[in-house]
Image (spheres, coloured by chain):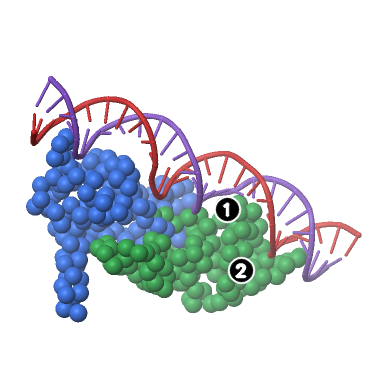
Chain colours: A blue, B green, C red, D purple
Amino acid sequence: MRISTKGRYALRMLVDLAEHKNDGFIALKDIANRQNISKKYLEQIVTVLNKSHILQTNRGFQGGYKLAVSPDKCTVGEIIRITEGTLSPLACIDDENEINCERSDECATLFVWQGLKDVVTNYLDGITLQDIVDKKQESYANDYVI
Amino acid sequence: MRISTKGRYALRMLVDLAEHKNDGFIALKDIANRQNISKKYLEQIVTVLNKSHILQTNRGFQGGYKLAVSPDKCTVGEIIRITEGTLSPLACIDDENEINCERSDECATLFVWQGLKDVVTNYLDGITLQDIVDKKQESYANDYVI
DNA sequence: TGTTTCCCTACTATTATACTCGACTTTATT
DNA sequence: AATAAAGTCGAGTATAATAGTAGGGAAACA
């Protein structure tokens, strides 16, 4: 049960944008360098993100990306749903809790997986980009004290 | 982020064994029929389960499997850890919370995934085979009332 | 001895993952 | 107007995981 690089890189990219939200448009090149992610691969991930409306884009010289939403309004759950397609641990339940399996009536274990999906969804929808940025600042502060 | 058939089938097999815990050894053939799972595929899954100590086996005529532990002592988390290898959503954290990634110090998102792992672990470790059997009985009772 | 069962190894088709590569378009600056 | 720096788009590819199938061997019991 893994979160793929797609979702993880997307999150890191968006956290990076959240940190630089007052610096205008940020070039993918810079994010790729800072985050140590292949720029070409990030391009593909950004394509997926662009299908939602969390990013603003400028092309050409001095172009780049910036968040179109406030970091405290954008949850990790949202980002993972966009990039991974779903938060559901099984194909037989989707994000709308609709069940598509003929065995569902007799399936004794279905409620286990529905519950898992709910637990994961609640957790990831409870964390915003801002939370991550704040936590990072906090940990820098701790380092300084030590 | 999916749970594979391996883990799901293993769980269904063990719930089946929990339901028949007083019927002696249960042949894989019967479980495969009841659960609508390829017997040959189940054989492979049982091989994995056999490496832990939750099953008792008898070969030959009238042979089969039975639970070696009480259904209320065996959690879903345990079963998924055995079959999927880990409950961690990332390779950079394992089940013992050890971190194996050079970027971990600067990784702003690590705590998100650690938290996810904890949430998933707590949830799945909180459900036993007996819970699933009970829930099933309960839903049959409801059907009868209607 | 024969049948039933588990046990073990190998093979395979399909899909997902994690990228790379090349060509094209847009646009601010000179 | 030219150029260089961006994003955009489509294709290709190597590796691994998934979800099985297939076949024979060994143990147990009647």
Q: Which residue is mark 1?
A: B37
Q: Is residue B61 left or right of residue A127?
A: right
Chain of the residue under the numbered disc 2 shown in the image: B
Residue A57 visible, this orientation: yes
Which quarter of the rendered picture does the C terminus of chain B lie within? bottom left
Q: Position of residue B118 (x, y in %)?
A: 34, 70
Q: Residues within 10 Å of mark 1 (few under 14, many from 20)?
A: some
Q: Residue at x 37, y 64 (%)?
A: B101
Quadrant in the rendering for residue A48: top left
- Where residue B126 sits, quadrant-wise, is bottom left
Name the foreground residue: D29 vs D2. Answer: D2
Q: As shown in the figure, which amino acid type bears the numbered disc 1?
A: Ile
Secondary structure of the residue carrying tag 1 is loop
Q: Residue at x 45, y 61 (%)?
A: A109
Quadrant, the N terminus of chain B = bottom left
Give residue A105's position: percent from left, percent from top: 45, 53
Q: Tell me what residue is drawn at x 20 percent, y 71 percent.
A: A139
| Quadrant assignment, res B33 | bottom right
Tell me: A60 left or right of B46: left
- Considering every residue shown, the one lying at the far bottom of the view is A146
Q: Where is C15 relative to B68, above or below?
A: above
- The three-letter code of the residue at mark 2 reads Asn
The residue located at (16%, 78%) in the rendering is: A145
Residue in the foreground of this view, choosing between A92 and C30: C30
**Marks 1 and 2, how far apart at CA:** 18 Å
| First in sequence: mark 1 vs mark 2 | 1
Q: Which residue is mark 2?
A: B50
For the residues tagged 1 and 2, is the chain the same? yes
